[in-house]
Amino acid sequence: MKTNIICRLQVEGLHWWPEASKYEPTMVYLESPHRHMFHFRVEIDVFHNDRDIEFILLKRELEGLYNDGTLELDHQSCEMMADNLADYIYGKYPGRNFTIIVSEDGENGAICTYPANDNDVIVGAVN
């Protein structure tokens, strides 16, 4: 049997897409900072069924990354936010498959799936 835990969190933040109008002129409003509630869902492998990773503690840990400024939203797309969070997860929880879903206001977003590694593949910017 394969088991994953699920952790959900929300982070209020501003972001912007500096070159939005380059791709679609009517999207120029996205070039200015604008607020979203970013919804994160992290699904990660666990290796036994007795709190291998405690999901409440994981939620607090991940929220702390944004609260203390370790991870920031800035001008990033949902995919970029997932990659930066993946860097942290790879470092802290190696050898596990995981998926990160990031959406703007619980509507549109991205699903990013990351294969297990042994701390040798880092995808984003946080080390």
Image (tube, rainbow, N blue to C red):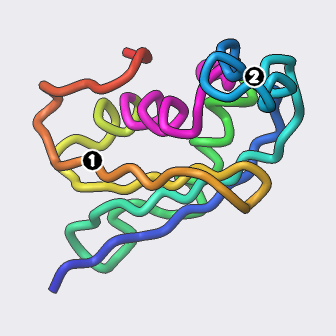
Neighbours of disc 2 within 10 Å: few (<14), some (14-19), many (20+): some
Residue 42, position as x, y percentages in the image: 48, 57
Secondary element at tag 1? strand
Name which quarter of the figure residue 43 lies in: bottom left
Q: Is residue 24 above or below residue 33?
A: below
Residue 117, position as x, y percentages in the image: 13, 40
What residue is rendered at 81% in x and 22% in y? 28
Quadrant into which the N terminus falls: bottom left
Q: Is residue 52 left or right of residue 7?
A: left
- Between residues 50 and 86, which one lies in front from this camera angle? 86
Quadrant into which the C terminus falls: top left
- As drawn, the label of residue 114 is 1
Instruction: Tell which tag, 1 or 2, sits nearer the viewer.
Output: 2
Q: Is residue 50 above or below residue 119?
A: below
Magenta span includes 84: yes
- Between residues 6 and 101, which one lies in front from this camera angle? 101
Q: Is residue 73 left or right of residue 80?
A: right
Residue under numbered circle 2? 16
What residue is rendered at 39% in x and 49% in y? 112
Residue 105, position as x, y percentages in the image: 79, 54
Secondary element at tag 2? loop
Task: Give the magenta part as a residue range.
Answer: 69-87
Identify residue type, mark 1. Answer: Tyr
Magenta span includes 76: yes
